[in-house]
Image (tube, helix red, strand yellow):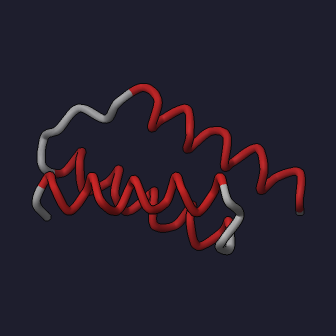
Amino acid sequence: MAIDDLEVEISYLVGAAEGEQGDLHEIKFRLDQAISTMRAEGLTVPEDLLNFEMDLDRMLSVKS
Protein backbone atom coordinates (compact mmCIF):
# COMPACT_ATOMS: atom_id res chain seq x y z
CA MET A 1 0.00 0.00 0.00
CA ALA A 2 1.40 3.41 -0.93
CA ILE A 3 2.13 5.98 1.76
CA ASP A 4 -0.46 8.31 0.23
CA ASP A 5 -3.11 5.59 0.50
CA LEU A 6 -2.22 5.00 4.16
CA GLU A 7 -2.45 8.73 4.90
CA VAL A 8 -5.88 8.94 3.26
CA GLU A 9 -7.12 5.89 5.17
CA ILE A 10 -5.82 7.19 8.51
CA SER A 11 -7.26 10.65 7.88
CA TYR A 12 -10.65 9.10 7.14
CA LEU A 13 -10.53 6.95 10.28
CA VAL A 14 -9.63 9.89 12.52
CA GLY A 15 -12.46 11.96 11.05
CA ALA A 16 -14.92 9.11 11.40
CA ALA A 17 -13.99 8.54 15.04
CA GLU A 18 -14.16 12.24 15.92
CA GLY A 19 -17.52 12.68 14.21
CA GLU A 20 -18.77 9.29 15.39
CA GLN A 21 -19.79 8.59 11.79
CA GLY A 22 -18.95 4.96 12.00
CA ASP A 23 -18.79 1.88 14.12
CA LEU A 24 -15.82 2.20 16.48
CA HIS A 25 -15.08 -1.51 16.11
CA GLU A 26 -14.76 -1.09 12.34
CA ILE A 27 -12.61 2.02 12.78
CA LYS A 28 -10.34 0.16 15.21
CA PHE A 29 -10.08 -2.81 12.86
CA ARG A 30 -9.12 -0.62 9.91
CA LEU A 31 -6.67 1.38 12.03
CA ASP A 32 -5.01 -1.86 13.16
CA GLN A 33 -4.70 -2.89 9.50
CA ALA A 34 -3.12 0.44 8.56
CA ILE A 35 -0.64 0.24 11.44
CA SER A 36 0.23 -3.35 10.56
CA THR A 37 0.84 -2.31 6.97
CA MET A 38 3.10 0.52 8.07
CA ARG A 39 5.12 -1.85 10.22
CA ALA A 40 5.32 -4.46 7.46
CA GLU A 41 6.67 -1.84 5.08
CA GLY A 42 9.28 -0.77 7.62
CA LEU A 43 7.68 2.59 8.33
CA THR A 44 7.75 4.20 11.75
CA VAL A 45 4.28 4.45 13.24
CA PRO A 46 3.77 8.00 14.55
CA GLU A 47 3.27 8.36 18.31
CA ASP A 48 -0.03 10.20 17.88
CA LEU A 49 -1.38 7.33 15.80
CA LEU A 50 -0.43 4.84 18.51
CA ASN A 51 -2.12 7.10 21.07
CA PHE A 52 -5.24 7.19 18.88
CA GLU A 53 -5.20 3.39 18.81
CA MET A 54 -5.00 3.28 22.62
CA ASP A 55 -7.82 5.84 22.90
CA LEU A 56 -10.02 3.64 20.72
CA ASP A 57 -9.17 0.64 22.89
CA ARG A 58 -10.28 2.58 25.97
CA MET A 59 -13.48 3.78 24.32
CA LEU A 60 -14.36 0.27 23.24
CA SER A 61 -13.65 -1.22 26.67
CA VAL A 62 -15.99 1.33 28.29
CA LYS A 63 -18.79 0.58 25.81
CA SER A 64 -18.56 -3.18 26.36
Image location (x, y in percent) of residue 49: 45, 37
Image vertical order of residue 11 relative to residue 22, above or below? above
Q: How many marks?
A: 0
Is 18 in front, or is 46? Answer: 18
Image location (x, y in percent) of residue 45: 31, 35
**Identity of the residue drawn at 67% across and 59% down:** 19
Image vertical order of residue 47 relative to residue 17, above or below? above
Is 17 in front, or is 36? Answer: 17
In the rendered structure, the answer to whether residue 17 lies left or right of residue 40 reads right
Residue situated furthest top in the rendering = 47
Image location (x, y in percent) of residue 47: 42, 25
Image quarter of residue 46: top left
**Identity of the residue drawn at 55% across and 44% down:** 53
**Identity of the residue drawn at 24% across and 45% down:** 39
In the rendered structure, the answer to whether residue 1 lies left or right of residue 28 reads left
Image quarter of residue 34: bottom left
Image vertical order of residue 6 relative to residue 27, above or below? above
Quadrant location, the C terminus: bottom right
**Identity of the residue drawn at 67% across and 40% down:** 55
Image location (x, y in percent) of residue 32: 45, 57
In the rendered structure, the answer to whether residue 37 lies left or right of residue 63 reads left
Quadrant location, the N terminus: bottom left
Is 51 in front, or is 64? Answer: 51
